[in-house]
Structures are given as structure tokens and as C-alpha cells.
Amino acid sequence: MAAYLPLFVALPLAAGFACLLIKGVAPRATPWLSVASMLGLLALAVGAVARGGVEVTFAGDWGLRPFGDGVWVSGVALVLDGLSRLFLLLVAVVGTASAIYALRYLAPEPGRPLFHVLFNLLVAGMNGALLAGDLFTLYVFVEVASIASYGLVAYRTGGTEVEAAFKYLVLGTLASTGILLGITVLYAATGFLNLADLAAAIAAGAVPPVALAFASGLFVLGFATKTAAMPFHAWLPDAHPSAPAPISAMLSGLLIKTLGIYALVRVFYVVVGMDEQVRLILTALGCLSMWGGVLLAQAQDDLKRILAFHSVSQMGYVLIALGLGTWLGVAAALFHAVNHALFKSALFLSSGSLERVTGTRKLSEMGGVFRRAPATSVGLVGACLSISGIPPFNGFWSKLLILIALVSGGQYLVALLAAGAALMTLVTFVKVQRKAVFGALPARLAGAREVPATMYLPVLALVVLCLLSGLLWPAGVDGVIGAAASAVRSPAGERPAAELYIESIHRSPSR
Amino acid sequence: MTFYALTLALLGVGLYGLLAKRNMLKKVLGLVILDYAVNLLLVAVGYRAGGGAPILLPGEDPAAFAAGSVDPLPQALVLTSIVIGLGATMLLVAMVLRLHQRYGTLDVDRMDRLKG
């Protein structure tokens, strides 16, 4: 029944290798191959969302052998629950928008087929991480996605880009090594890698408290670096702006959430358990990121760097909501993560269009492009309104939900900090709009022209999704987002909903 | 116990090379040492005193095999981890080459144009 799960990884992987094979014969077909693979994933993800429950499959199952009083499980566990569904859908939506945008954004240069190879590998890695049912598979797919992203950041191969990629690679590999060390510690203590077995063993107290604290610390360090939470953010403001616009959108919109937020939720809410210290650390990291990101963004003139610092800041909101440990906190965090993926990818794609229209990324050299490029401008303004939290756009509702979750959890000071940071965000994006879109058109830009439709339509589609998510959010929070939150926390609070996940793996027919 | 302590010391050496050295090649070496320290630890975790090579022969009783051999899983994991480490290192070395061509130096401080 769940035998289709490997397709989520196999489809982009096959598309990626196909791009490599045809790059000498039909290099112009590679962008379309990416679009086709993303549309296929979108269909698969929508199909997966329509089905409920937890689906489990063991990919590459090469038979079971009796052992002791149980059996040996062979094969790679892939598990699809509400949380994975939400993120798979998100990857497919943002991936489709970015793939369509890349059709005309990248000129038919010699490196373009390789761009699409890495693009597909990035998506395969993220999807694999979202489905992984054991810690080591999670680690492998995190590495697949990360290594693809290092290559994509260096795509332009200029000095700045390679330097940013070098920094990103060093910090990213350090984070991955920490994660692997954490996995080693847990394996040494329990003899399990499967998330369900591991969760059961940890709940039964099989891991000594010191070892558990050490492993937790390493996981926080590793996944917080992948999320770019302050003070582990140093790579992001260099790496995200250096990548081509569609990749900036993928990295800021998806990668920091699938490898960071999703992995944190999966590892801490389902496996290790959210104790007081972890909650405190997540809240502290969140507050620091929220304010640090927004303050550092004020000093920037480069549009893409402003957006990158705001990614750090917006991830802060998600982390403080996760630090609450309640169902409402998780739901608010996931809702904000979804909204951030939609508006931040729209913003990064717009920044690419604006760069095409004006020939610069510096805000001080832009201005008045509204008449010249109306569709791009409308997209940018819509996404700006979303991130600054203007109702009825989605950013307002998810920030409000986070504030409500904080107040109901008794975190008044954090709620105050979050409201203050939201105000600062509004200030930045009012400035961005005024300088980029409105005002007088510099004489230099008198001949500026609108970008092609395949570049502004994906942005407009994402902005429409932002608006829809803002208008229909009660249904969304009841539906797919609520299902995702319920997958790791039951609304009542006490009995962890993660038990369903664990039971489903244990009862899987192939086991 | 001594073995674990030495592995952790190796981990420290790698971390020091990665974070404290300004020469990019030394950073790469630090990263490789760090990587291998974790791999070594992973293999050591699966070791069992007096255990044989984990190869299950046809007809062998699985329970007897499990009692008499070292844990095969960490070895499989380490193989994967080595391949991943190799990929990352190759990419890193390629980037160092490119940066050296462009700036004519391996010192990260003398080419730092990014402000993070």
C-alpha cells in the first residue's frame, strides 16, 4: 500500500541523472525535465495529503530472518505521517515555482544542465530526509541535500560565490559531523537506529542521562546550524545571496526548514523527548535569531542580504513557538514555517526579477520600477506585505497564532520580544518597498523592461497562495497543518501523539 | 576506554585544525581528521572482544553468528559515511583550488571580502 513512498526520492533522483546523461545531446531539455519532475512530485504530494494516517514501507526489503525472540528487519524504513506530508507538499509547491522560474532566468550557458542535476539532487535529498524512518537514513539524506546545496551556492564560480560556498561547506560539514556523533552515542547506548525503537528505548530509560544530554546537545548544535539559528547563522547571509535566485528561494524557503526545523521536531518531539533544558535552549536560540537577524538586516543595502538576514529572524519565531512544547506551539510554528516558505521564496524570486529589471541588487540604486515592471512589482509588494504581517496576508495570522501560543503558555516576555521584532520587520520591508518599487525612476533605468511571464507568474502564484493561506487559515490549521502538529503532539498535551508513529512502524506488515 | 579517549583526542585535533588555522588546506585537513575520528568511534562502538568478521555463511545459525561476531551495522554505516566524507572533501578541495587561482593565497583572512 505504501510502496509508492520511494518514488518521492526516486523521481527527482532519476530526473537528476537523466539531466546528466542528456547534457551533451539535448542541453535545452534539462530545464523542462526539472519542471516535469517537480510537477510529478506535486501530484504525488497532493495524493499523499489526500490519504490520512501513517504509511510505512521498507524500501529494498531483502527478507526477514528470525533472531532471538524477534526478527531482523532489513531495508530502509520510509515513514509518511502528517508532519512529513505537510513538508513534502511544501517542497513540491516551492520546487515547482522555482523550476518554472529557472526556465528563463538562467541563460542557456554550458553549466545549465549541471545546475538542473544539482537542483534535482537537492529535492531528492530533502524528500528523503522527510521520509527517513531511521536516524542514519536521515543523516545520509541531509548530507545529499547539503552537498547539492554547496555546489549550487558556488554555481556562479566567482570569488565571492566560491568563498561563501567554502564557508557554508565547512560549517555545514561540522554540523553534520556533530549529528553523526550524536547518532553514534545513541546507537552505542541502545543498539537501535530506527526512530520507533530508539524512542521506545529512550522512553524506557535505556540511555544514561549523561549520554542522552550529550547526544541532545550535538543534535541541537547540528540541526540549529542547518536552520541557521543565531549564533550558528554565519554561513547563511553569505551563502543564500550568492546562489542564483531560484536556488536562494529553495535554500531559504525549504532547505533550512526541511533539514533544520523538520529534523528538530522529528528528533526532539518524537525520539529524544522535549525536556525543560531543550525547550529553554530552543527559546533562547529563537529570541536571539529573531532580534539579531532583524537588527543586522537594517544595516544592509543589498536586497538579497536583507532577505537572508530576515530568514534568520523568521526562523527565530518558529524556534520560540517550538520551544513551548505544546500542541498550539507546534501548530503555530509549522504554520509560520509554511508561510515563510511561501513568502520568502516569492521574495527571493522577486529579487532575481528586480536584478534583471534594474541590473543591480543595491536598494539605493533602485526605485520607481512600478510603471516599468508592474507584475514584478505587484509580486514583490504582496510578498513584502506577507512578511511584515499585514492582514489579511498569511504572515499576520501565523505571527498572531505564535503570540497566542506564547501567552497561553505563560511566556509573556518572549511574546513581547516577538511583537517587537515583528514591528522591526515591518519597518524594514516598508523601506524595501519604498526604495525598490515606488519613488522616482532613476534616469539610468529609463529603458528598464518587464521580465518574461515564466519569471513573474510563479511569484504571483506564490503571492496568491500567501493570500489564500491568510484567508483560509482556520481550515488549514484544522486540516493539513493541524494533522502535522497532531502527528507529534496530541492537543490534550499529556499523551505524546508520537506513540501512533511508533506503533505504526512496529505494526507495519513488512515487519 | 583508552581507545575512546584517544578517539576523542583525535576529534579535538580535527576541531582545532578546522577552527583555529587560517590556511585553507589546513582547515581541509582538520575536517578530514574530524570526519575520521567520528568514523573510528562508530567502528569502535560495534567492536566486541574476541568477535570474528561479521560474514554470515550459508547454513550458519543466525543466533550463533550474532553471538560470535562483531556488530556488522556500524561497519556498514562507516562505509556510507566515508563515501559522504569523500564527496564533501573533493568539493572542498575543488573550491580551495578555485579560490587559490583567484586570490593567489590560501590564507582566509587575506581574501575575506564577505562580512558574514
Image: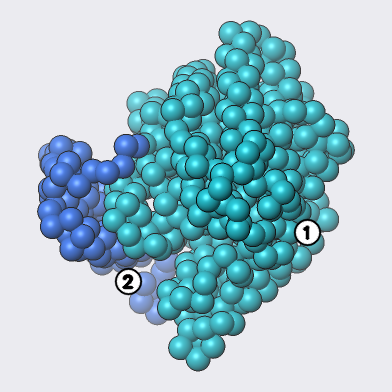
Chain colours: A cyan, B blue
Q: Which residue is mark 1?
A: A46
| Residue A366 position (above or below residue B54) | above
| Residue A124 position (above or below residue A391) | below
Q: Nearer the viewer, mark 2 or mark 1?
A: 1
Rendering coords of residue A200 (x, y %): 56, 38
In the image: residue A254, left or right of residue B54: right
Asked which quadrant contains residue A330, the reply is top right
What amino acid does circle 2 point to?
Ile
User: Looking at the image, which residue is at 73% across and 41% down?
Assistant: A382
Residue A286 versus residue A301: which sits nearer the camera? A301
Q: For the C terminus of chain A, which image quadrant?
A: bottom right
The crowd level at tag 2 (other Cα within 10 Å; few <14, some 14-19, many 20+) is: few
Residue A96 versus residue A439: which sits nearer the camera? A439
Rendering coords of residue A18 (x, y %): 53, 81
Is there any visible trace of residue A22 in the rendered image? yes
In the image: residue A476, left or right of residue B97: right
Q: Secondary structure at mark 1?
A: helix
Q: Which residue is mark 2?
A: B55
What amino acid does circle 1 point to?
Val
Outermost residue to the front: A443
Residue A342 versus residue A411: which sits nearer the camera? A342
User: Looking at the image, which residue is at 45% across and 55% down?
Assistant: A243
The crowd level at tag 1 (other Cα within 10 Å; few <14, some 14-19, many 20+) is: some
| Residue A20 position (above or below residue B91) | below
